[in-house]
C-alpha cells in the first residue's frame, strides 16, 4: 500500500508550510537542515553532527522550498540555496558527511526527515557546505 499522489503532495506541502491539507496552518514551520557523518535511525537517533567549529543547522522557512510536484512520487526541492557558515575547523574530525537531516529545532529537537547525500565528503577548515537551489530533494512515495 502507498499514499495516493495527491496525499503525498499534500503532506509534503503541509510539512514545509506551503499549504495545508488539514486546515489552517497558522505559522509556517521552521525546518532546520543539518549534516550527519552517521546513518540516522528512523527514530531520530544515531545522528552525528559537528558540535563546534562554526557548525550550526541552517534554518529554513516555507519560502525556501518550492511547492511539491503532483508526480508519483511527489518531490519537493529547496527553492533557495541552503548555505552553512564557513567551517572554522574540520567538522566531525574530518569524517565524511554522508546524510542530511531535517529537524524541528536549531539544537536537539526531533528529526523529521533524513536522506543520504549524493556525494559524501568532509567539511574542512575554511570550507562552506551548501545545497544549491534544487539540490536538496525530499520525496514522498
Image: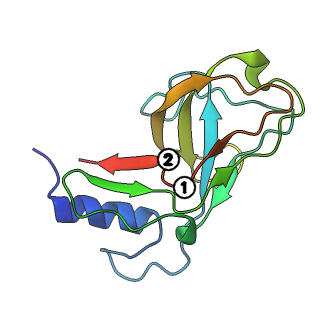
How would you rate the neighbour count of disc 2 (Cα within 10 Å): few for under 14, some for 14-19, many for 20 or more? Answer: some
Q: Nearer the viewer, residue 25 or 93?
A: 93
For residue 135, which numbered disc appears in the image? Answer: 2
Left or right: where does residue 134 sit relative to residue 91? Answer: left
Q: Secondary structure at mark 1?
A: loop
- The residue lying toward the viewer, choosing from 56 and 89, is 89
Residue 137 visible: yes
Q: Does the image show residue 46?
A: no
Q: Report the residue that reaches farthest toward the right.
A: 88
Residue 24: x and y, percent? 41, 83
Question: Going 48% across and 53% down the picture, which residue do you hit?
Answer: 134
Q: What is the basis of the colouring in this image?
A: rainbow
* Picture residue at 40% right of the left edge, 49% below the top: 138
Where 133 falls versus 109 (above or below)?
below
Mark 1 sits on what residue?
A: 133
**Labels 2 & 1 near each other (Cβ < 8 A):** yes
- Side (left or right) of 103 relative to 50: left
Amino acid at each position: 500500500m502507498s499514499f495516493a499522489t495527491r496525499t503525498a503532495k499534500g503532506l509534503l506541502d503541509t510539512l514545509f508550510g506551503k499549504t495545508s491539507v488539514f486546515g489552517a496552518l497558522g505559522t509556517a514551520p521552521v525546518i532546520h537542515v543539518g549534516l550527519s557523518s552517521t546513518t540516522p535511525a528512523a527514530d531520530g537517533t544515531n545522528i552525528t553532527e559537528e558540535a563546534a567549529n562554526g557548525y550550526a543547522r541552517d534554518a529554513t522557512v516555507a519560502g525556501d522550498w518550492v511547492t511539491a510536484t503532483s508526480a508519483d512520487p511527489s518531490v519537493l526541492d529547496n527553492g533557495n540555496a541552503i548555505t552553512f557558515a564557513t567551517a572554522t575547523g574540520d567538522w566531525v574530525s574530518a569524517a565524511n558527511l554522508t546524510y542530511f537531516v531535517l529537524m524541528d529545532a536549531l539544537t536537539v529537537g526531533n528529526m523529521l526527515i533524513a536522506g543520504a547525500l549524493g556525494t559524501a565528503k568532509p567539511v574542512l577548515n575554511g570550507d562552506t557546505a551548501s545545497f544549491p537551489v534544487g539540490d536538496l530533494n525530499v520525496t514522498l512515495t
